Image (cartoon, rainbow, N blue to C red):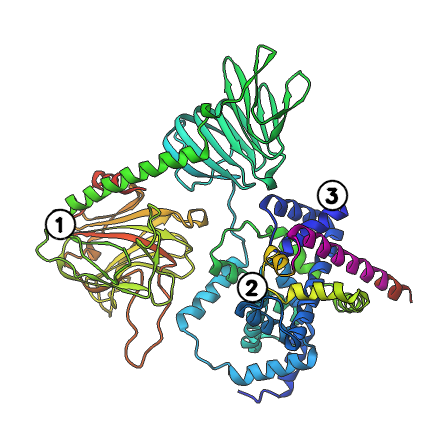
């Protein structure tokens, strides 16, 4: 890489204006070249120096377009840079203001320590070059399971029918119509062996290539499509221009409106036909009408569920009012309405704004009261997890932890946790207060921001606990006889948080879910696998 | 707790002060272009201070402080709950850590830069410095100063490059002096 190019990349990165493709190039260069790194450090040194100068100046005259954010940031910088003396002074001031015996929230500091142990040892990773950004009636071969937001696995993909849209990390949008066989080789290269593929290439991804048996398309900033089938291959330029390198024939530049057809070694120019390929807008239209259909189907299901006498609680988290109506109508002992605390409005799983609740603000929860005693229980929720950054990430927990009370939460390692307390101390030899039913790890950061349906069934009759993710069984475990609870109580409880700090004890562990919830259902019967699967199929966005 | 001005704490403050530049450089290197890097640096200083009793005076202060800085950066990223698109690979981050930790000419380089900055034409210096006094994006800023974003980007880039060339000349002079 030339020096000038490197410097431009560094400046773009430091201005916060770098594209993803360029960031990857910069990273590659910094990884191998010590001089490139020196250049990087020097440019940051310059940034720091200029920021410090700017800060000094800010005291003298108004800065250009000052905002409160800058002011705060500049103040922060001031004491780091205004020289040794003031750093000492600031530190001393800090020491006086913030004595180290300032109480910390115990749960929080523990969490921090725990994180230090794991995160500093290994960085989280994911792999892939693209995500699925939309699908209409897709049928994937070979048991490939790709849903909205899925990371696309490496290797050949076979879309038997339907339409799928991908967003490559380079910024390229790809719409693929089945039947198609293709591989995403990198953020900048796609191999198409069969089918119609339409690519929209933004400026930072110029040079994006589509490889076919017939030849190679190199994009020059545009939108184009290829149609590869047994009879031959077509390339259509829908906007901008491309370089077309047919196999065994001279390369040519094609412009908007140009198209070419190559069959049996003979190339014939034809007219470009945009209508032949589904584009991103058309796909969005199809998706929108599909979503509307799905929403009305789920609304109908909600109406049917309300008449199910086994449904004790059903909350949809529309946040316009801070009270959530319990939609369950047929049970003799319905749960109370839900009282929203702190949680903020968020988009729901269909993408409608303010129809879900974000529980990441401190103290967030929905308070509910569930009367009655139960032998069986089914909990179902639709949840979007940002990260599992607490030891315990709450879903549904009773206040405190008394005999017969259930706790449903997610561990920081991605396992579902369900328990019902059986004993108070003192315990018999080798016994504990409860048995914890863990699922295997189902969550990792690649699921961050994705809507998931979680369900757990406590079946006291069959003596088993089953955890579900998106309608499929994660694990099923027998309830040991000595831990079987046949009268479950709930009483006062919270969604997505645990417990209330009591008088004179304002400290509390941080257990609110870092994520959003848009629906919660509680049944007094153990729903069957088929029923859970059905709830997922009817409720999935 | 002992008096804040006791000898061991004065020593600690001196160590912390001495590694401000590499520490902030390290944090900025891991968070390129992130406006909150300064806040993370401040948070790191606070955390270092909070943990000062855990520091063993016989050991490498810088390495200890860098470990805390790295943790604060990870913690910040986690709080942002953002994807990892603009995060360098772990190997590169480790290389950066060990290079910055084991290099001690940053003060000198920055001093050379400071002198070079004084050599710039006043209006060029003004432009560079004002850019950092503003939190506006480049294009917003271009509008404020009445220039095209593209033109301004080129000018700023050229000025920074000139400054760094000047710094290298100075350093090589100092080296041979």
Which quarter shows the C terminus of chain A? top left
Q: Nearer the viewer, mark 1 or mark 2?
A: 2
> For the residue carrying disc 3, how many other residues have a C-alpha within 10 Å: few (<14), some (14-19), or many (20+)?
few
Determine the chain carrying the residue at label 2: B
Q: Mark 2 points at which residue?
A: B36
Residue at horizontal 57%, vertical 52%? B87
Residue A72 location in percent, x, y?
55, 72
Q: In this view, does B90 lie to the left or right of A101?
A: right
Q: Which residue carries the number 3 mark?
A: A1
Residue located farthest toward the left when viewing the structure as drawn: A332
Q: Which of A87 and B99 is in front in this view?
A: A87
Q: Which chain carries label 3?
A: A
Q: Give the range drawn in magenta.
A: B146-170
B169 part of magenta stretch = yes
As measured in the structure, the alpha-carbon distance from the residue carrying label 3 to the one carrying label 2 is 30 Å
- Residue under disc 3 on the same chain as residue under disc 2: no
CA distance for labels 1 and 3: 67 Å
Disc 1 is placed on an element classified as loop
- Compared with B37, A257 (above or below) is above
Residue B111 placement: quadrant: bottom right
Q: Is residue B93 left or right of residue B117?
A: left
Q: Is residue A329 above or below residue A263?
A: below
Q: Residues within 10 Å of mark 1 (few under 14, many from 20)?
A: many
Quadrant of res A215 = top right
Distance from label 1 to label 2 (Cα)? 51 Å
Q: Name the residue under label 1.
A: A310
């Amino acid at each position: 890489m030339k020096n000038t190019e490197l410097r431009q990349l560094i400046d773009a990165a430091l201005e916060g204006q770098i594209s993803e493709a360029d960031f990857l190039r910069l990273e590659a260069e910094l990884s191998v070249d010590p001089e490139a790194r020196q250049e990087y450090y020097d440019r940051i040194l310059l940034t720091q120096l200029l920021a410090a100068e700017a800060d000094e100046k800010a005291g003298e005259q108004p800065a250009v377009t000052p905002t409160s954010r800058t002011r705060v940031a500049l103040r922060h910088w001031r004491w780091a840079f205004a020289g040794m003396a003031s750093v000492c002074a600031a530190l001393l001031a800090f020491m006086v203001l913030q004595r180290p015996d300032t109480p910390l929230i115990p749960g929080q500091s523990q969490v921090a320590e725990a994180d230090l142990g794991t995160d500093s040892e290994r960085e989280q990773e994911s792999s892939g070059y693209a995500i699925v950004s939309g699908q209409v009636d897709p049928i994937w071969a070979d048991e490939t399971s790709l849903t909205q937001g899925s990371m696309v696995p490496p290797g050949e993909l076979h879309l038997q029918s339907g339409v799928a849209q991908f967003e490559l990390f380079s910024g390229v949008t790809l719409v693929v119509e089945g039947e198609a066989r293709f591989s995403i080789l990198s953020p900048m290269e796609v191999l198409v062996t069969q089918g119609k593929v339409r690519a929209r290439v933004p400026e930072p991804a110029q040079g994006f290539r589509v490889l076919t048996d017939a030849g190679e398309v190199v994009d020059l900033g545009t939108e184009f499509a290829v149609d590869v089938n047994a009879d031959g291959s077509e390339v259509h330029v829908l906007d901008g221009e491309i370089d077309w390198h047919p196999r065994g024939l001279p390369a040519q530049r094609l412009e908007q409106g140009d198209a070419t057809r190559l069959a049996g070694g003979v190339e014939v120019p034809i007219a470009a036909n945009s209508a032949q390929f589904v584009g991103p807008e058309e796909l969005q239209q199809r998706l929108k009408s599909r979503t509307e259909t799905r929403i009305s189907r789920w609304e109908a299901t909600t109406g049917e569920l309300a008449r199910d006498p086994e449904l004790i609680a059903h909350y949809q988290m529309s946040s316009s009012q801070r009270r959530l109506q319990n939609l369950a109508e047929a049970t003799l002992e319905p749960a109370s309405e839900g009282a929203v605390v702190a949680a903020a409005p968020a988009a729901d799983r269909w993408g409608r704004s303010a129809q879900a609740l974000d529980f990441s603000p401190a103290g967030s929860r929905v308070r509910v009261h569930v009367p009655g005693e139960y032998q069986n229980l089914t909990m179902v929720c639709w949840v979007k997890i940002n990260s599992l950054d607490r030891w315990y990430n709450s879903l549904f927990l009773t206040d405190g932890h008394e005999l017969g009370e259930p706790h449903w939460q997610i561990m920081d390692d991605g396992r579902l946790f369900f328990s019902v307390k059986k004993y108070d101390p003192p315990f018999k030899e080798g016994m504990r207060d409860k048995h914890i039913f863990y699922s295997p790890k189902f969550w990792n950061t690649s699921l961050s921001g994705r809507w998931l349906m979680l369900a757990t069934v406590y079946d006291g009759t069959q003596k088993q606990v089953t955890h579900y993710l998106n309608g499929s069984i994660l694990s099923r475990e027998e309830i040991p006889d000595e831990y079987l609870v046949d009268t479950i109580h709930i009483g006062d409880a919270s969604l997505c948080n645990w417990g209330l700090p009591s008088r004179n004890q304002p400290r509390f562990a941080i257990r609110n879910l870092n994520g959003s919830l848009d629906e919660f259902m509680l049944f007094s019967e153990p729903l069957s696998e088929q029923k859970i699967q059905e709830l997922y199929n009817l409720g999935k966005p | 707790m002992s008096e804040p001005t006791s000898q061991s704490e004065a020593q600690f403050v001196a160590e912390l002060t001495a590694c401000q530049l590499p520490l902030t450089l390290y944090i900025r290197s891991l968070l390129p272009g992130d406006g909150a890097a300064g806040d993370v640096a401040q948070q790191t200083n606070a955390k270092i201070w909070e943990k000062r009793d855990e520091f063993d005076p016989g050991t490498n202060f810088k390495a200890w402080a860098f470990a805390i800085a790295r943790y604060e950066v990870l913690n910040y990223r986690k709080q942002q709950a953002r994807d990892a698109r603009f995060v360098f690979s772990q190997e590169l981050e480790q290389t950066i850590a060990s290079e910055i930790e084991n290099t001690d000419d940053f003060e000198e380089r920055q001093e050379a830069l400071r002198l070079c900055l004084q050599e710039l034409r006043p209006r060029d210096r003004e432009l560079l410095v004002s850019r950092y006094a503003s939190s506006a994006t480049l294009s917003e800023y271009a509008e404020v100063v009445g220039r095209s974003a593209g033109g301004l980007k080129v000018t700023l880039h050229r000025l920074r490059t000139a400054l760094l060339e000047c710094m290298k000349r100075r350093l090589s002079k100092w080296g041979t002096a």
